[in-house]
Image (tube, grey):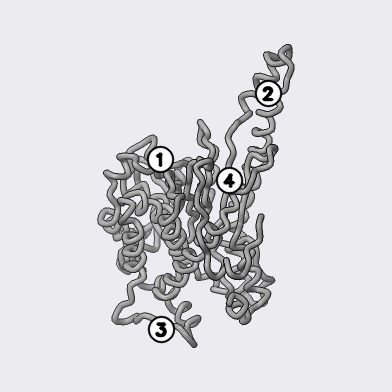
Amino acid sequence: MRTMDKHEMSCPQPIERPASYDKRVALVLQGGGALGSYQAGVYEALSESAYVPDWIAGISIGSINAAIIAGNAPDNRVARLREFWEEITAPSAWWPASSGGPGHEAYGRAGALSAILFGQPGFFAPREPLAWLTGAGPSSYYDSSALRATLERLVDFDRINARETRLSVGAVNVRTGNFCYFDNAEIKLRPEHVMASSALPPAFAAIEIDGEFYWDGGLVSNTPLEYVLEYYPRRSRLAFQVDVFPSRGPLPRTLEQASEREKDIRYSSRTRKGTDSFRAMHDIRHNLETLLGKLPDHLKNEPEVELLREMACVTTMDIAHLIYRSDENQGSYKDYEFTRQTMRERWAQGLSDMQLTLAASPWLEPRPAHVGARTFDVTREVHELRGKLGDGYEHARA
């Protein structure tokens, strides 16, 4: 992949999409609670490009962002995302907004504690104390009914079910333990499908849908990438996979850092494994297609060849990673730190990372004939440069 120079890092200019690059575009959004504002920033940049997705898939907070995007006209999507994130991070009389600077880290920690004790407006609230004194008590710590009202206000489900944009959200059946996707290409989606995808226990109760109960899809898989790329019949795609837990990180030196690093590895490892497995398998499929075309006629109808033909595939896939990476430790509570300033910082980083990725557009480089699936991570280079230069990074950019 071509290396960006310092000027490109500071002044990213989008590369024009040639007509010859005709892949469909998918946006894949991982779960991660408060970290999801990074995804909103990614979409803001993407919405201004030539790569507006026709399919959006999400899990947990990713499903909420995905529903807001798919459930609004293109010109209104970023505004609706902004409205959602501003609402759920709204300061109150007893919890004012931070102005940054010294003490911001402590403010963020206190903000996470606030989410635990008081919930977040338009999203979730703690159960009433009396609920714990009757019978066996509730099955979750929080009531998420406020989320339903928010979704009904910000998302046009008639638009979603008109299938102008494909929407898929992942959840887990509590009774069977089976993972499933609610997909507007197959069923009519309602607010409870999105709520089920984001009902992470024991914080949130399972959501009933047509007599079955569902939890957050992140219990099984935190990314819907494989569902999008494996959906049959396959189509050649460029998938923007937006992850909020980085796989790489420094050796922890404190217990708090160890807790954060453990969470990053736990959620990113399954994503990385799934991506690597798909890429290896799709390379095999792609090369099988080429090989079958070279067989002599007397072998083409052999039973073994018929089996291989079912596995072969002519499609090619490009996967562009957008991964939220912070230059500082944010604590194991980072996915439930809903302070407004931190939300805006994450949003801005998502916007910047997507702009850099579009400026590089590595998927436009020639693809080797034997490669069926490629992966790209443009911002990893930028993050590593920041780590090496430290405080000198901004000077180097100039």
Q: Nearer the viewer, mark 1 or mark 2?
A: 2
Residue, disc 4? 318
Q: Which mark is residue 99?
A: 3
Separation of disc 2 and disc 4 at Cα? 23 Å
Task: Please tell me which of labels 1 and 4 falls first in the chain.
Answer: 1
Type of the residue with mark 2: Gly
Separation of disc 1 and disc 4 at Cα? 22 Å
**Residue 9 x/y as whole percent:** 57, 68
Residue, disc 1? 183
Separation of disc 1 and disc 2 at Cα? 35 Å
Task: Please tell me which of labels 3 and 1 falls first in the chain.
Answer: 3
Task: Please tell me which of labels 3 and 4 falls first in the chain.
Answer: 3
Residue located at (36% from left, 36% from top): 187
Q: Which mark is residue 293?
A: 2
**The N terminus is located in which quarter?**
bottom right
| Looking at the image, residue 320 lies above or below residue 297 | below
User: Within 10 Å of the Cα at label 4, are there few (<14), some (14-19), or many (20+) other Cα atoms?
Assistant: many
Q: Which mark is residue 220?
A: none
Judge from the rendering whether residue 354 lies leftward or rightward of residue 186; answer left or right: right
| Looking at the image, residue 121 lies above or below residue 97 | above
**Residue 26 x/y as whole percent:** 48, 46
Q: Nearer the viewer, mark 1 or mark 4?
A: 4
Q: Secondary structure at mark 2?
A: loop
